[in-house]
Amino acid sequence: MSEEERNVVAPEQVPVADSIVARFGNALRTDDRDGYEGYVVSVESLKDVATVLRDELGYDYLSSVTGVDYFDEGKIEVVYHAYQTSGGPALNFKVQVDRENPILPSLVSVYPGADFQEREIFDMYGVSFEGHPNLRRILMWDGFAGHPLRKDWQEAYFEEENKPFDSRWPGGDVKRSEAENRFGKNVSYPDEFDIDNWAPEDDSSLYAGLNKSGSNGKKLKTDSLVVNMGPQHPSTHGVFRMVVALDGETITDLQPVMGYLHRNHEKIGERNTFLQNMPYTDRLDYLSSMSNNLGYSLAVEKLMGVDVPERAEYLRVLMAELTRVSNHMWAIGFLLNDLGAFQTPALYAIRARELILDIFEATAGSRMMCNYMRFGGVARDLPDTLRDENTVDFIGDLVNERLPAAIDELDRFLTGNEIVRSRCIGVGVLPADKAIAYSTAGPLLRASGVPYDLRRAEPYSIYDRLDFEVCTRSNGDVYDRYVVRIDEMRESVKICQQVMREIPEEGEIFTGKPQYNVRVPKGESYGRVENPKGELGYYVVSKGKTNPYRYHVRAPSFINLTVLGEMCKGHKVADAVVILGSIDIVLGEVDR
Amino acid sequence: MSPVIGIVIEAIIKSALMVFVLATAFAYLTLAERKIAAFVQVRKGPNRVGPWGLMQPAADGIKLLFKEEMVPAGADKVLFFLAPILTMIPAMVIMAVVPIGPDVELFGRSIRLGISDLNVGMLYILSVASVAVYGIVLAGWSSANKYSLLGGLRASAQMISYEIALGLSIIGPIILAGTMSLQGIITAQQQSTWYVLWQPVGALVFFLAGLAEVNRAPFDMPEAEQELTAGYFTEYSGMKFSLFFMGEYIKMVAVCAIATTLFLGGYLGPYVEQLPWLGILYFTIKTTALLFLMIWIRLTLPRLRYDQLMAFGWKVLLPLALANVVVTATATVLLG
């Protein structure tokens, strides 16, 4: 599938190449490294190129920004993937800077959606973005020394560059890292750092950046109040923090703070072998592990150039769509919880989800951490029986009867509910142009009236053969996001019904011989899927070894949060909670 | 034995019994709420402690008693200590004027089932209910916590707004009965019929305003979990927390008991004249039904937003209650 896709992609890129190469001359060249695509832009003309791309060529949607540390060449490369919201393949452009003095112009003024992603690169690589409105660390804590994704940065108790590690007990000689000095050789501090007298910085700089002027226009003199909602707070769905400046009950500014669950997924990914990363992807958005698997498989399969057998493709789509249903059930249930309903809608919503998890468990061996897909297929075929029923009958019954009934039930009780409507309509409005500019994805983007769904915009797997609608609404408020989710569940069920009708009864589910250590050809690839939460992208760079040189996750929850502050301004505290709930974040993915 | 001593002893015994009954009602109301919630949500609910989880409240009580009491460093210690008491006491003493049954013969004395029968019973209820808000506001203020402060602010605004509608809604029964004594109102209902039939709007307004008064969903703004963690009692733990908890549930019982008295005929029911003790049963059944309604509403509805709540109170409930008063008064005058 990868070869085909490249052939399709190439002719479309030619006119773009002509027009911008002619315009920028030396400032822009085709990336001619083996296995790479796109363009390399010079630092000086980066902003101009981006502006031209956005305004004249229609690449209005910046999907992903990430960095790669090419340590041997002494360069840090920042990679941008831009798309047209009308559909089509990516335009991939890069800019290279010196490792020692990495300064780049910020693209936030062109693509506001680059905000958090540039902060992440600043955090992880130390690249300074000039003109960025709020260039602070985002995932690591403010006092952290070093930039963890640089190739010369080593974690505490660093063992080896790549897994599998050598025996930790060579010859039975047990060595425990706890026994080592806390200032041991793997733990490095800056010279002036005094660990015994160190006190963490307070958040005064964060608070100082907030807009505290009340905008209510009343004569009454009011004081503003800064409230930290989180990291421990019932509404944040995890350890997420919203620093809110309040004027009475009205929000004048909101600043999301994250990273409490940060484990440097990407650094771990670079230590792991390609296949070892698969179970790690389950833990990103732990409610939709099947879709996470799919995205990562697509990215690596593009590099390897393997084809996926027909039956495996159907199984993948079936699992991904069931995941979408279960995720949206969860999202709607918890949106209602955020509205203050006492768990009842949530528990009814996840009743049907339980049956979906039964299928996952019977097939993949685990309810949530499925680890189901492999490069070139899936790990296991459907079992013969499930809950003492024929599996095909069970799934058929589920997608034809029970899931539609469950969705109708939610629809019947919630959609017309007076309180739900009065709390959701007109709250957290995100206009279409802003939704695109801020790189929002998934139901958030579609509720704003942008019919952008990767399954249609750049079909992967067998989605081009399936019949389904891209669900959109036009108001872009919390209510529309809710309705879009209900509609999407219906469409997903429709897809599942088609899959169950058309799936080949017999057939291979895996190409080639299963092996633990795949060798992936040199090159880069960006695989993306329409995750329930939005566009999930994996940017993988291989140097021909058994482990990825760079492994980046474009997490939809993380990037959708960029616009949170914007949406909450002028609303009440209670609305902030609902707006956050309507974005539907999972902190495992936000913090990575 | 002089009659005065007899009256005092009687009052003491009745008060002690009332406190005991209310405390038990609180305990089993929490269990009932959890069981009903479980039933509504297709779960099992507490079922480990005793048969059907019947000893759960005792286990909870023991746990709360032995929990560490924490006082935030910046808190105003005196007010912080006083606030839970100020919430709890008014909730208890409200019940003093509610008759739970007709007079009965016991040990050769005629004993009133109910601690007292003030001739200004309704005024007493309104004034005591207003005191309860101080506990909440002070808890919010003294905790030195922003969530608590916001919760306290919301509570004061909400309670003051809804108290007006609440006060107006009880004027209907007072006009109809021609007395402020709760016993008198029941007697008047005995002669005509339950006032919920004459005063459907008043009953509705009373129930809704009562929900807001006791901070129950969908008006549980002051403690909105998703927004303010726990609102005014965020910083409370151990026994102080359970006093708030207790105050809240006992207030629920009190509001339902008053609603029963005003609109559902109190302890009235078939054969109550022949068997006065039946009155307690009828009263309990009616109050429990209202409590179930409150729990049911909480389990069904999402929360309103703060500004919507205020708008509802001032723009809907208040005019409705006022109109009800005007119509009732006019009708009473015209029809005699």
Image: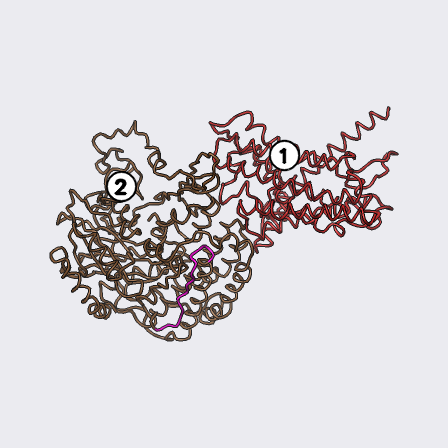
Chain colours: A brown, B red
Above or below: residue A503 compared with residue A173: below
Quadrant of the rendering where the N terminus of chain A is positioned: bottom left
Q: Chain of mark 2?
A: A
Quadrant of res B213: top right
Residue at 29% in and 69% down: A308
Q: Which residue is mark 1?
A: B132
Q: Chain of mark 1?
A: B
**Stretch in magenta:** A465-479
Q: Are marks 1 and 2 on the same chain?
A: no
Residue B180 visible? The answer is yes
Q: Check the image and name the residue furthest to the front.
A: A219
Q: Secondary structure at mark 1?
A: helix
Dot 2 alpha-carbon crowd within 10 angstroms: few under 14, some 14 to 19, many 20 or more = few
Amino acid marked by disc 1: Ala
> Quick one: A43 or B33, which is closer to the camera?
A43
Residue at 38% in and 46% down: A565
Residue B6 at x, y percent in the picture:
83, 27
Q: Which residue is mark 2?
A: A174
Residue A201 at x, y percent in the picture:
32, 32
Which is more foreground, mark 1 or mark 2? 1
Residue A33 visible? The answer is no
Q: Main secondary structure of the magenta part?
A: loop
Residue A464 at x, y percent in the picture:
33, 71
Above or below: residue A443 compared with residue A265: below
Dot 1 alpha-carbon crowd within 10 angstroms: few under 14, some 14 to 19, many 20 or more = many
Residue A251 at x, y percent in the picture:
44, 43
| Residue A466 is covered by the magenta coloring | yes
> Quick one: B23 or B300, which is closer to the camera?
B300
| Residue B243 is covered by the magenta coloring | no
